[in-house]
Amino acid sequence: MPDFFYEKNINDLLVDTKQKLIAGIDEAGRGPLAGPVIAAAVIFPDLNISEELRLNLNDSKKLTAKKRDYLFDLLHKSSAIIGCGQASVEEIDQLNILQATLLAMERAVQNLAFLPNYCLIDGNKLPKHLPCPAQYLVKGDALSLSISAASIIAKVTRDRLMNNLSFQYPQYKWNKNAGYGTKDHLEALEKYGICPHHRTSFSPIKKFL
C-alpha cells in the first residue's frame, strides 16, 4: 500500500522552507483511441490525511469504479489541494501522447491553488516546465499516497468527461469503455467511422481517415 515514505524524505531536505508542499502527479488516458489525456496534482499540506484516506488510497487501476468515485468525493472534502490539467486530442496528435501527457501534468500543477516546493511524478519522465524540483517514481501510484490520490482524481475526472461525451456520440459507448479500443468501440468505428474526438495519430484510427 502507498504511504508517505518519499514525501517525508523530501520534507527532511526542505529545511529552509517554511511551508512544505509536495505534489503527487499522475495521469489518465494515455492509451485510449479517443478523448483528451487528463493529469492531476494533489498536495496534502503537512502530510495531513484522514485515516480513512490513508487506509483506502491506492493505484486507481486496483480500485473499483464505485470505490474511486467515493475516494474522489472524499478527497475533495478533505484539506487536500487539487489541480487538474488536460491536453486535447489535437495536442495529442500534434505533439505525440508522451509530450501531451507531460503538458497536461504541467497544467495540473499550474492549476493548484498553491505552487508546490517539490513534485513526485508517476512514470519515468519529467515535464520540462515545472516551478520546482521534481523526481519520477516508476509505479508511483502504488508507492506514494500523494500520487495515488492524483491517480484517482485524474481517472474519475476523465471517466466523467468521457461519460458526458457519450451523450453526444452514444454509438461508441464511451460511458462504458472510456475511449479505449474495446470490441464495442472498434465495431462502432467500423460501422460509423470516426468523430472529432478520435486521436487520428493512433494506429487503429488511421485506417478510418
Image (cartoon, rainbow, N blue to C red):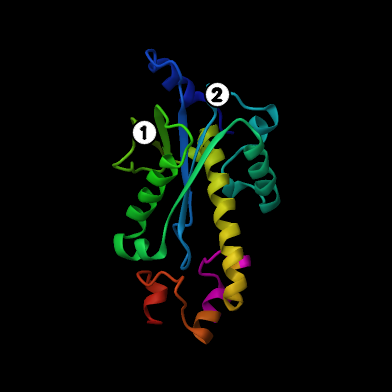
Residue at point 29%, 42% (across, down): 128
Q: Quarter holding the N terminus?
A: top right
Contact, CB < 8 Å: mark 2 with mark 1?
no
Residue 99 image offset from top left, x and y in percent: 32, 53
Residue 195 visible within the image = yes
Given the current orientation, which residue lies at the most extreme top position? 15
Residue 173 visible within the image = no
Give, as a single range, the part of the protein colored magenta: 175-187
Counting residues from the N terminus, which is met first, the one under dot 2 or under dot 1? 2
Residue 117 image offset from top left, x and y in percent: 40, 26
Q: Amino acid at mark 2?
A: Leu
Q: What residue is pinned by disc 2?
A: 47
Image height of 25 relative to 3, above or below: below
Q: Amino acid at mark 1?
A: Gln
Residue at point 40%, 46% (across, down): 107
In the depicted view, which residue is nearer to us: 129 or 55? 129
Image height of 1 relative to 37, above or below: above
Number of the front mark, 2 or 1: 2
Helix, strand or loop: magenta stretch: helix
Residue at point 42%, 40% (across, down): 109
Crowdedness of circle 1 by 10 Å Cα count: few (<14), some, many (20+)?
Answer: some
> For numbered disc 2, what is the local secondary structure?
helix
Q: Quarter holding the C terminus?
A: bottom left
Crowdedness of circle 2 by 10 Å Cα count: few (<14), some, many (20+)?
Answer: some
User: From mark 2 to mark 1, how far is it between C-alphas?
Assistant: 18 Å
Q: What residue is pinned by disc 1?
A: 135
Determine if the magenta segment contains residue 178: yes
Determine if the magenta segment contains residue 124: no
Location of residue 176 (image quadrant) = bottom right
Given the current orientation, which residue lies at the most extreme bottom position? 191
Residue 89 image offset from top left, x and y in percent: 41, 64
